[in-house]
């Protein structure tokens, strides 16, 4: 009976490797995001001489949006892989990110929601710069969605704070 239990447990533990293709897929998504960024950068640079100041700001905000999305992907790839699949052995590399290996599931979800709030905020700022071209009802929905992200982030942080205090009390 113990051998059956050990076999099942080994199989369950090995099943974590089923997540590896997801992270490889996210790396491919990062490549696609890079391609989109380069296309946006090219459009920005080639239209800069004839752009208005507000169009230039919108172009810059779009590039920042891509950058934040790329950072978000890297955080998910690194921390997700390390938390759920296997440690990434790069400790001797001089460019090893300081946070790598230190982002647990709780910190990951807070970083995710913070990135989503930032991306949503930048998108909303772009909308505000074109406020005359977008229907008021659409702007209201965008504000409502952004605020739901903000409230979700605050509630997640509050839940983590309560959980951390609960753990401290038990010790």
Image (spheres, rainbow, N blue to C red):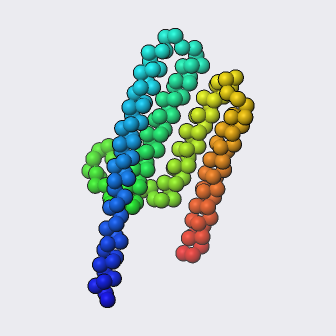
Work out which residue is located at the far left of the displayed protein and give it.
Answer: 92
Percent x, y of residue 57: 56, 22
Work out which residue is located at the far top of the displayed protein and give it.
Answer: 50
Is residue 1 something one can see in this rendering? yes
Front-most of residues 3 and 111: 3
Is residue 100 something one can see in this rendering? no
Q: Quadrant of residue 16?
A: bottom left
**154 over 84 or under it: above or below:** above
Percent x, y of residue 114: 56, 46
Front-most of residues 123 and 153: 123
- Residue at left 34%, top 60%? 18
Percent x, y of residue 147: 67, 44
Work out which residue is located at the far bottom of the displayed protein and give it.
Answer: 1
Placement of the N terminus among the 4 image quadrants? bottom left
Front-most of residues 20 and 105: 20
**100 over 140 or under it: above or below:** below
Percent x, y of residue 70: 43, 39
Exactly how many numbered labels are in the figure? 0
Could you tell whether 73 is left or right of 160 in the image? left
Could you tell whether 118 is left or right of 18 in the image? right
Placement of the C terminus among the 4 image quadrants? bottom right
Q: Quadrant of residue 74?
A: top left
- Residue at left 31%, top 74%? 10
Q: Quadrant of residue 94?
A: top left
- Residue at left 41%, top 54%? 79
- Residue at left 60%, top 70%? 166
């Amino acid at each position: 009976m113990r051998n059956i239990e050990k076999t099942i447990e080994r199989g369950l533990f090995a099943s974590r490797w089923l997540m590896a293709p997801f992270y490889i897929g996210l790396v491919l998504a990062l490549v696609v995001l890079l391609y989109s960024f380069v296309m946006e950068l090219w459009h920005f640079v080639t239209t800069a001489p004839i752009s208005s100041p507000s169009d230039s700001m919108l172009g810059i905000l779009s590039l920042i949006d891509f950058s934040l999305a790329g950072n978000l992907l890297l955080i998910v790839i690194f921390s997700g892989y390390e938390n759920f699949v296997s440690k990434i052995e790069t400790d001797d590399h001089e460019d090893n990110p300081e946070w790598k290996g230190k982002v647990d599931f709780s910190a990951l979800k807070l970083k995710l929601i913070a990135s989503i709030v930032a991306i949503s905020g930048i998108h909303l700022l772009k909308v505000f710069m074109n406020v005359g071209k977008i229907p008021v009802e659409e702007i209201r929905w965008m504000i409502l969605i952004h605020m739901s992200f903000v409230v979700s982030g605050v509630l997640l942080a509050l839940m983590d704070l309560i959980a951390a205090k609960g753990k401290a009390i038990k010790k």
